[in-house]
Amino acid sequence: MVAVFAFLLVSSSTVVVTGGMAPVTPSDSGEAVPDDGPDYGVNNSTFQRLWSEDVDNGNLSADDFDDANISSRAEFAHRLARSTDIPFARPPQATEDWNSGDFGDYNPGDRSSSVHPEGASLDDGVYIKDAYVSIFAIQPSTVLHQSNGTTQYIASDGKVRVISDYRVATPQGDQNGSHRERWSVDRTSIESVELSADDQTIDSGSGHQATLQYTGLSGSPRLTVEANITVTLRHVTLDCPNWNSSISGCDGDWTRNIETPEVSKTVSTSQPVVVNRLSDITGKRVQFEAHDDQIGAVVHPNTEWSTISVDGDVRARSNWWFYTAGSSGWQTMVTSTATNTSRAASSVRPVQVHAFPSRQAPYVPTEPADNGEHPLAIEETWGTEQAGPSLPANIDLESANPYVNADSIALSSTTLDESAFREVTVHGIVRGQSRTVSLAEQQTVRETNLTLTVTEANATHAVVRAMVTENVTDDAVTTGRVTIGNQTTALNSSGVAVITVSNPSLLVHGRYQSAAWWRTEQPYAASEDIAKTPANFPDLQTLIQLVVVTILWFIPVVVLVFGFDYMSNGALLGFTNRT
């Protein structure tokens, strides 16, 4: 099992992703992993991880992963991927590499057959039958899982790969009698394949396979692919003016007429998408007045994100993780003819990236320096709390429920240079999509002075006046709170707080605490102070009264004691002479 964890570590997937909601029943069944992989530049280990919808064998033991039972790294990856699903820390490039190569494996049918994925929507015309167009893949894209369903997010620039096919049904000819007809197919083609967004044409191509480009998309468009199929038929008619019925033959020449009717059919499919926006990112830098070696930053991505990079490869990871699975409806390829329908395992298997919220909190994956210090720390992440989504039942991963969408994050460092936070790069949940923003605004965490003064005190309580000022300017600090014991009071507009302390001790300890520097417009450092309560000595009159009362109390006792001693002739205390 040590080897298993080592592989997970190398694969950057050691996250624990447990906890979730009721699963969703998958739409596909059968063998999930294509037989023709790995290929197209996707290595074996990554290829095995792509097909999360496969049936997992959770009964494998640690012995199944021992070196004695595994002949190669490829076999190890194969067993591990068959025992569980392994998430990705970022949207993998391998999905697009695979789809680009596998797209070319599609082989359409001939004029009498249509080859289509089982999930295709077929349409029939008079002569054109089993016609369809299907979106093979939108690249790059990520299907985001949330409690209210799924949404396919795309980048503003990308491509749509589509396939299309059909078959031609010619009328039955008649080769008997004085009127005869012959039908044949003269020419067929998919004249055009057009991509449009909200009814505006973006790109066009032709043929059974087309890769269509789009740029500059925004908002929530509906991508529509439309294929125009044209067929030219050849219709030959023969008529005999002098038909001899006795011999069932023509006495003379046949009248020949040729027609080439052209028919067409348009088929379409569409997919609603959302462009993953990274245009609302804001943030600010923070420096610390008393700590030259400490820097900080607050970043508000204001959308789902995967990583935030600072100073090159130093980065913070979000709680969104990724898995990949084959697109629904493509496991089986169907061949339809006029008389038969046959099914076979599909040789074209597009794969799709999915994002889900894990129970792993945002963290810094960057390795610590030689001295053991991490270059980056996450102070806090915050955002809206949401219910976790349901993942398909055949996905061996579980989402967090509930989870906090980290719309904002506070970062700090004591090892990076001051310039590290001048720019940060936020990477979205769609592969290759990122935006670098400048954190031009800068704040300073200012040092403060807390001064405590005991203005009134007695045996039961003390009134303490707390004054907070800025260390450099002596200006009053008007935000934050002062705490003494279990009493806490906010500063007023003059930077003063008055606190009454019950049963005060000789020393009164107070602490000023501002709001966290990442949650306030003007952050301040904490400060402390100690004040003495005045000694509570009694006045002269009280002392005289105390002495008089004490004497009056003790004179009868002394007389009584001496009386008993005298009566006992000194036997009681020995104060009197016994002789």
Image (cartoon, grey):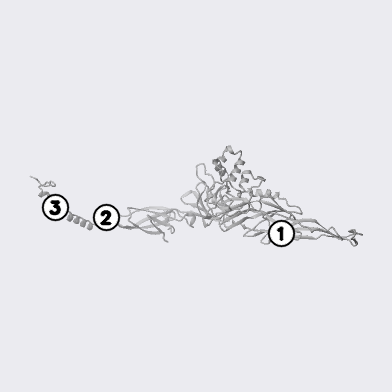
SS state under label 2: loop
- Crowd class of label 1 (few under 14; some 14 to 19; many from 20; radius 10 Å): some
Q: Quadrant of residue 168?
A: bottom right
Q: Nearer the viewer, residue 73 or 223?
A: 73
Among numbered discs 3 and 1, the one appearing first in the sequence:
1
Q: Of the numbered discs in the image, which one, if any, rests on residue 537?
A: 2
Residue underneath mark 1 = 123
- Residue at the extreme front of the image, as rendered: 246
Q: Residue furthest left?
A: 579
Q: Which of disc 3 and disc 2 is earlier in sequence?
A: 2
Residue 174 falls left or right of residue 40: right
Crowd rating for badge 2 (residues with CA inside 10 Å; few <14, some 14–19, many 20+): few
Q: Amino acid at mark 1?
A: Asp
Q: CA distance from mark 2 to mark 3?
A: 34 Å
Instruction: Give the distance between the C-alpha atoms of the residues marked 3 and 1, in whole angstroms.
Output: 126 Å
Res 207 quadrant in image: bottom right
Q: Residues within 10 Å of mark 3 (few under 14, many from 20)?
A: few
Dividing the image into 4 quarters, which one contains the N terminus?
top right
Instruction: Pinpoint residue 186: horizontal percent, then vertical percent.
Output: 81, 56
Q: In the structure shown, which secondary structural element does the residue marked by tag 1 occupy?
A: loop
